[in-house]
Amino acid sequence: MEVVYLLTAEIPSEFHCSQITTFHMQNVTIHLKEMQFNYSTDYLKSNLFLGLIQLGLGIASILTDSMSWFFQYGWLLIGLITLSRNYKSRTGSYIILENEILSIQYIFGYKKIKISDFKSITKKKNSLILDNGKKKKKIWTWLAEKNTPELLFSGINKIISESKETE
């Protein structure tokens, strides 16, 4: 509300608040067709901390020889995998929305979903659910940045409504 009042004070009086917000939302959803969403910093920090703990546990168990070799090198391996996954998460985007294709980062690469194949989208607390009548696809958004669910929902909803109009 405060932003709308600031905008109306700087523009001519013939514009209305609803026109401004509608125009702003149309521009936002147009740019969403080529948008990247990163992991949240809380998730990245906790993942880094967990990887360092696992690596430290592996090093400590090797130095003290308190566990069998399987567990000693197992903790080292798990710690290195967690740290490499953390590096991959920091350098790559979690979700990429580009030209009706949604790419979601998994352990080995990205999984691509064609959005125009779906007919509806539902927003839950920690996820978005795409539905086409025969199958449902859940997209977890709790790993992503703070405003990702709202922006992603509006972008996917715009693409779904455009694909319905062309049919």
Image (cartoon, rainbow, N blue to C red):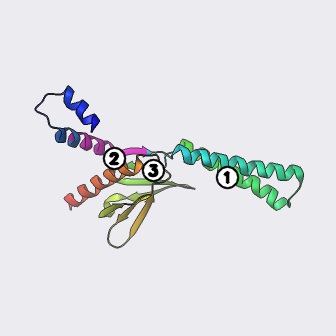
- Residue that mark 2 sits on: 33
Image mark for residue 81: 1
Corner quadrant of residue 116: bottom left
Residue 89 visible in the picture: no
- Please identify the quadrant where the C terminus is shown: bottom left
Task: Identify the main secondary structure in magenta.
Answer: helix
Mark 1: give few (<14), some (14-19) or many (20+) Cα within 10 Å: some
Quickly name the residue at label 3: 95
Left or right: where 54 falls relative to 14: right
The Cα–Cα distance between marks 2 and 3, rounded to whole angstroms, is: 12 Å
Q: Horizontal and vertical percent for residue 91?
A: 55, 42
- Which residue occupies the foreground of this view, 118 or 25? 25
Q: Is residue 1 left or right of residue 141?
A: left
Nearest the viewer among 113 and 51 is 51
Give the residue at x 76% y 55%. Answer: 75
Check residue 90 for magenta coloring: no
Q: Badge 2 local density, few (<14 within 10 Å), some, or many (20+)?
A: many
Q: Mark 3: which amino acid?
A: Ile
Query: Do callouts 2 and 1 mark residues in contact (Cβ within 8 Å)?
Result: no
Which residues are the magenta region?
23-36
In the rendered image, the residue lying farthest to the right is: 65
